Image (cartoon, helix red, strand yellow):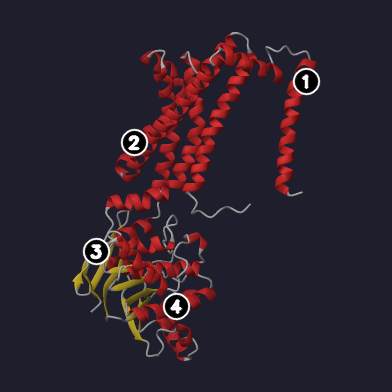
Amino acid sequence: MSQATTQKLVAVTILALVLLVWQFLPPALGVPKFIIPTITDMLSELGRMYRREDLIENTLSTALYTVLGFGIGSALGAAIGYLLGLSEFWERVLSPYILALQIAPKVAFAPLFIMWFGYNATPKLLVTVLIVFFPVLVNVLAAMKTVDRDMVNLARAYSLTRWQIFMKVEFPSTLPNLMAGLRIASTLAVIGVTVGELVGGNTGLGFLISYGGGQANAAMVFNSIVLLTVIGILLYSVLVWAEERLLHYLPKKEH
Amino acid sequence: MALEFDHVSKTFALPSGQELTAVNDINFKVEKGEFVSVVGPSGCGKSTILSMTAGLYQPTSGQVKVSGQLVTKPNPHVGFMLQKDLLLPWRTIIKNVEFGLESRGVSKSERRDRAMAELERCHLKGFENHYPYQLSGGMRQRAALARTLAIDPDIILLDEPFSALDAQTKLLIQDSFAETIKEAGITTLLITHDLAESVIMSDRVLVLSERPGTVQREIPIALPNREHPLARRQMTEIHEYANEIFTLLKLDRRAA
């Protein structure tokens, strides 16, 4: 048997074991299902959520705001990262503030945004934009600072304009870092939306989590967490797929 | 006259506030079609000479002229190559060769034709659609030479282009470069640490002093076969020339 097949087999076996233990161990130990629901409890709750709790609408809403927040936040982060990367002066002036904002826990802004904008979609979108913004900005900025100076000099010697140098040398050079930043940001986007919905929403999976929690419905919470994870994995996979196509010119690492 | 340095000095202001004179009162001329090497101890300002010829910065005093024209800014008639091939990894080889032509108002189809012709001259036909990572170090340097020649320069500057290659590849690439350059009839200035390389490849060797660098001797290499360094390598005279340069650079004393 090849090593790859063995790896897959072991991985699937572990999954099956975890599910089996989850299904049978808690009832055997007398743990009530509002603490740890079994797999079958969760599946039947999923059916109920589909019929009674607008599961599809809530999931799609969360997915939409995840993608939207990710898109806006990373576009802003990249744009400002490149602008600061082009101007050493502004980078030096603004970097302490960027650092401070980067360290500040972004999710803690959620109650503020709700006070300012009310119980609608704006606060969760803002939290997501804010949380996505920094990893993209920081990655782009770091990459702009490490562009090969000799390559820029070569482009200068070939009389390329400042804009051409950016488009033909600097931007493509930073692409691997930009993609790495986007990958980190994609996982954070789900957190941003969830926090926004937890704190002050009446739609989305984050809302279902706080609603289910209030009703001691652990199965509903678990189901929502699983769906949130699926949204995150999908977004992440799209980025990995895009990255492999965009960065095909990099030699593959040998394992 | 392809290249002329007339009493050129260059002083840099260091961040500490001190001044550093990299080169002092450099004078030399390179005739059209000539291949001249510059050797000297580390930090003698060889790369400063190159950057001033390319127009990346200006001398503090004196004049640098390429084809009789004073160099004041990046000069479209100068091509340069470094130890690093500086191929753009996201472009295919042919798109890399076209790179230097993209700001010169050359049409797309003409760019492609000129790039193909240069690839053929540099023995890279068939590799035009490969990416740089798919090529060996020697082939990548040949691609960089093709890119340099594609802009049809009056002069090319080579800054240690062979020093990152393994010993055998180096011999083959030196030979291939020498042949291509001779055939194209292009004036060349080679900056190198390798004394034997300077002798087997050049018409003339300029020996610089320690910093601040100045030309302490010009040694004409009166040997045939400039386009075949591999053949020159067999000649016994090579050792005499290399020894002469070795003595001038006082390398034995530095080793002590």
Is there any visible trace of residue B19 in the rendered image? Answer: no
For mark 4, name the chain.
B
Label 3 sits on a secondary structure element that is: loop
Q: Pointer 4: what residue?
A: B176
Residue A88: x and y in percent read: 32, 44
> Considering only vertical position in the picture, is B36 above or below A124?
below
CA distance for labels 2 and 4: 51 Å
> Considering only vertical position in the picture, is B119 above or below A124?
below
Describe residue A250's horizontal placement relative to residue B8 as left or right.
right
Describe residue A19's horizontal placement relative to residue B70 as left or right.
right
| Residue A47 occupies quadrant | top right
Pointer 1 and pointer 2 on the same chain: yes
Q: Nearer the viewer, mark 3 or mark 1?
A: 1
Label 1 sits on a secondary structure element that is: helix
Q: Earlier in the sequence, mark 1 or mark 2?
A: 1
Pointer 3 and pointer 2 on the same chain: no
For mark 2, name the chain.
A
The image's mark for residue A24 is 1
Q: Which amino acid type corresponds to the residue marked 2 in the rendered image?
A: Leu
Question: Neighbour class for label 3 at 10 Å: few (<14), some, many (≥20)?
Answer: many
